[in-house]
Image (tube, grey):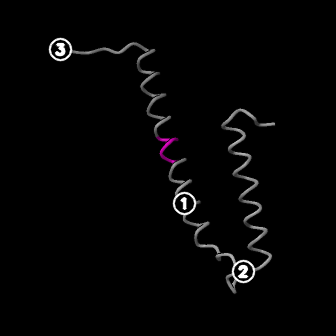
Amino acid sequence: MVVTNTVAEQNRAELDAAYVRSLVSALRHLNEIHNLIHELPAPESPDLNWEHLGTMNKVKSDLRDVANFLSGNDE
């Protein structure tokens, strides 16, 4: 028995597959960001410097932008 899918069903299957790939990729990026943040010097660490603060502020700003975009509050 041959099963034929409609164009709409094929398009939906392609959409679902592409969305899953993008979702998995985004979650991998989140995990990587989490790990990289934990590799930065801890507060009161002798290695902590102003560049680290600048890095953390940039990360904080970019993450806030992503959160605003996802919540629909993107200005």
Residue 22 falls within the magenta-colored stretch: yes
Q: Amino acid at mark 3?
A: Met
| Nearer-N-terminus badge (3/2) | 3
Outermost residue on the left side: it is: 1
Q: Residue at x 54, y 60 (%)?
A: 32
Q: Amino acid at mark 2?
A: Leu
Check the image and report above or below for 34 versus 48: above
Q: Secondary structure at mark 3?
A: loop
Q: Residue at x 71, y 59 (%)?
A: 59
Residue 51: horizontal and vertical position, in percent?
A: 78, 74
Check the image and report above or below for 65 versus 31: above
Residue at numbered disc 1? 32
Residue 33: horizontal and vertical position, in percent?
A: 59, 60
- Most frequent secondary structure within the magenta stretch: helix
- The number of numbered discs placed on residues in the rendered structure image is 3
Question: Magenta part of the protein: which range?
Answer: 21-25
Question: Are the two marked residues, 1 and 2, in contact with CB atoms closer than 8 angstroms?
Answer: no
Q: Secondary structure at mark 1?
A: helix
Q: Nearer the viewer, mark 3 or mark 2?
A: 2
Mark 3 → mark 1, Cα distance in angstroms: 46 Å
Q: Amino acid at mark 1?
A: Glu
Res 1 label: 3
Q: Quadrant of the C terminus?
A: top right
Outermost residue on the front side: it is: 44
Res 48 label: 2
Residue 15: horizontal and vertical position, in percent?
A: 49, 28
| Nearer-N-terminus badge (1/2) | 1
